[in-house]
Amino acid sequence: KSWGMKGSLAAHSPFVMFLEERKSSFRETSLSYLSGIMFSIGWWLWIDGVAWKSAFQDPISITFGHWVPGIVGTIGLFMVNAVSWTDLEGFGFGDDSTLSRSRIWLFASFTVCFSGIIASIWIAVEHWFNNADQGNVWPGVALICQNLLIFLAALAYRFAKPPPMDQPAF
């Protein structure tokens, strides 16, 4: 006789089902909070870099072009999380146009996110790291950290709600 929970009546008891639901709910809630914290810290670091530049009269002026990578990363965060897991279920790129469109959208979303990261590295190297003798590099470091944190926030929020366990995610 098996005394384990698997296959027994106790495995389907309301208490066990409640605990499983709470564990999943705790994971979703924790990752959602973590995502929001990372997103906020990313933008806070960039705003701190801009304020630092203004406070210490850094010779490099901040223009709208310096803000673009963070804006692009934020748009990418929303794009990545706009596709539900159920839209990605299935195999191949067959006749199902919803599956194909969802996968293309997700690919484009990650491309936008990586574009923000690449642009932030490019701007930081061009404006601050190559001119390190003229001022401090903190605004450049803050710009890169901002975009990396926004990307990590997008991933954390994406995986906060896992795909259904009975069906493959992709």
Image (spheres, helix red, strand yellow):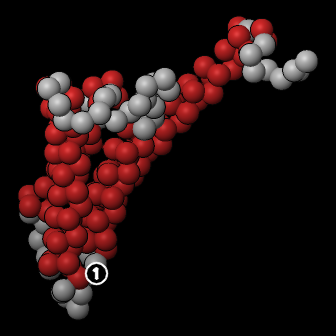
Q: How many marks?
A: 1
Residue positioned most to the bottom: 133
145 vs 73, left or right, is right
* Residue 87 % position (x, y): 27, 25
Q: Is mark 1 on a helix, strand or loop?
A: loop
29 vs 87, left or right, is right
Look at 23% across and 82% down and name the residue there.
129
Look at 24% across and 36% down and name the residue there.
92
Task: Name the residue that disc number 1 marks.
Answer: 136
- Give the answer, above or below, for where 133 lies relative to 33: below
Quarter of the image with the C terminus is top left
- Give the answer, above or below, for where 162 lies relative to 136: above
Look at 31% across and 71% down and name the residue there.
141
36 vs 1, left or right, is left
12 vs 101, left or right, is right
* Residue 43 % position (x, y): 31, 52
* Residue 58 % position (x, y): 20, 77
Badge 1 crowding class, 10 Å Cα cut-off, few under 14, some 14 to 19, many 20 or more, is some
As rendered, which of 70 and 76 lies closer to the eye?
76
Q: Is residue 21 visible?
A: yes
Look at 13% across and 66% down and name the residue there.
62
* Residue 145 % position (x, y): 34, 63
